[in-house]
Amino acid sequence: MLSAGVAVAASSVPLPTWTPEDKEAVKKGQLVPGLSLLTEESMADPLPKAVAEPPKPEEIAQSATPTPVVGDQYLDAYFGERPQHFLVDPQGLLSTKDARDRENFLNYHSSDSAIDLFVYLFDAHQEIPSEVREEEIVERHFSSGKPAVVVYYYLGAPERSNIYVSPLISDSVSAAEQRRALASSVEEAMEKPDKVAQFEAFCVQVAIRIYWMERATGLVTDEDPATPQLRPLAKAPKKEKEKSALVVKAEAIAAEWGPMAGIMGGALTIVGAGLSLARRRTRYRFPVFEVPPRMGGAHAAGIGAVISFGSTTQSPSSQRNEVPDYLGL
Amino acid sequence: MKCPRCVQVIHRGANLCPHCGFGIGEVDQRYGHDDVVLRRLGDVAGLIRAKDRPKVSAALDKFCKRFPQLFFAVYTGSGQGGGNLRQFGFWLLNRAAFEDVPVDRPNEAGILLVIDADSKSAAVTWGYQLDPFLTEEDTFFCLSRAHAYWLEGRFAEGIVRMIDQLEKVLRKRAAQARRDPEKFERKVAAPPRTGEIARRIREGHKQHAAAHTVVPAESQSREVAG
């Protein structure tokens, strides 16, 4: 086996051999052994480049991968009957949690709106089979019952979405209005980074546009209490003026001593009222002394002041009568 | 204490005015000897309007409640006293029998306000019981309070105002008398007799002379001890 291996090796690539010229060149420094291994220049002969011709347009059209079509096994689930849920996703494109969140939102919308919102969910690159006509499906399933808006949404490609309305409201909601609603919803969705968030934003915006569709169709009037009403804003509390330091100090003192002062004030008021009442009820008595009668008067001889009120220009003191009238008696 | 005629100060217990000889007999001759039946509010001159009479009566009642021993009476007349309201008030308070005053409040405890419409004058007289507690100045002060009302002919309001002021004065006097009754008792105590005064003077002289005669005796005893 060893000889066989040596024979194979000898036959495949010959080992390099030294020549006397190489020996002289090494001595002169003109040749460095192994130099070729340290340089990037390949010593081998370059491979011949393959010459490829540019593809023709026909070849490109034929070589493009065909868009996947929704499988036949899902067609009945999609289009067999009026969907039982507002979110139609038989392929399970959304996770369980996301599907539940969107279903909850659509249920909430249905409970709050006169127009239901049904969303058929497809993958971004999926195509609805050509034998399925969306308008016909909507007419067939949504002609009766509660009016509905049907959206075909492509997860991750909101711009491919289509919108249809049930025949009950198609007369009131024009095609242009439908396109505007779809366009605004797509715009909202495109602002989101991921496809789940896009789908959420899309549903919310469609629900908002349905609110205006309700009014356009006359299903809901402004007087309807079920519709959201603009309520007057609660009066915002007036912005308090900046209090001066004196006021703040007074308030602090009032907070600290207010209850005490109130109690004291109340107590003083009660005491004052009590004193006033007691004073009103007080009876004044005088000690009785033995007074000898004068000038024959049995009961009285106390002579007080005499005052005249005949002149309005003179004071009471000047009209005090202290002069005896001998001549008159 | 003054004489209602000569307005001179007289001593306590004088039967007649020592200055002019005035006594009740003189006014009795002029106004009558018999008692006069009156009510506390005697508006003979008709100075108080009918609608104001309740206010005055209420003020009189309040005065009687505040001072259970006293009463206040008002008498208005025309030409009463012949120009001398002091003598007329003196006579009226001694001869009046107030039929709406309880018997436990004699005229000695009464205060009488007399208003003469003709002379446009008012005077106050009080009984003996109030002698220690009222002065002429007190009554003038009270009359001054009513003066402005009476100038305008608002007699009822003036009377009420005067009664209020008199109540204040008497409340103050009552409080003072409760604290120091002797002070007021001295004002009306019977005057000492003339002989008594002479005896006290002589006793004072004797005590003074004895004090001077003791001093030499003491000095003598010190000399003996030395």
Image (spheres, grey):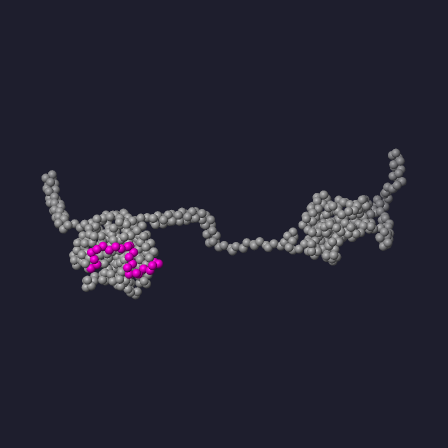
- Tell me the quadrant of the picture where the C terminus of chain B can be found: top left
Magenta stretch: includes residue A26: no
Instruction: Tell me: A226 left or right of B54.
Output: right
Please state if A52 lies on the left or on the right of A208 as rendered: right
Residue A8 vs residue A269: left or right? right
Image coords of residue A58 (percent x, y): 86, 54
- For the residue pair A188 and B25, the one nearer the viewer reads as B25
- Percent across and percent down for residue B47 are 30, 61
Residue sitting at x 84%, y 44%: A23
Q: Which residues are magenta?
A: B30-52
| Residue B48 lies in the magenta-colored region | yes
Residue at image coords 81%, 45%: A72
Quarter of the image that includes the N terminus of chain B = bottom left
Q: Residue furthest top?
A: A1
Front residue of A152/A44: it is A152
Whole-percent x, y for residue A89 in the image = 75, 46
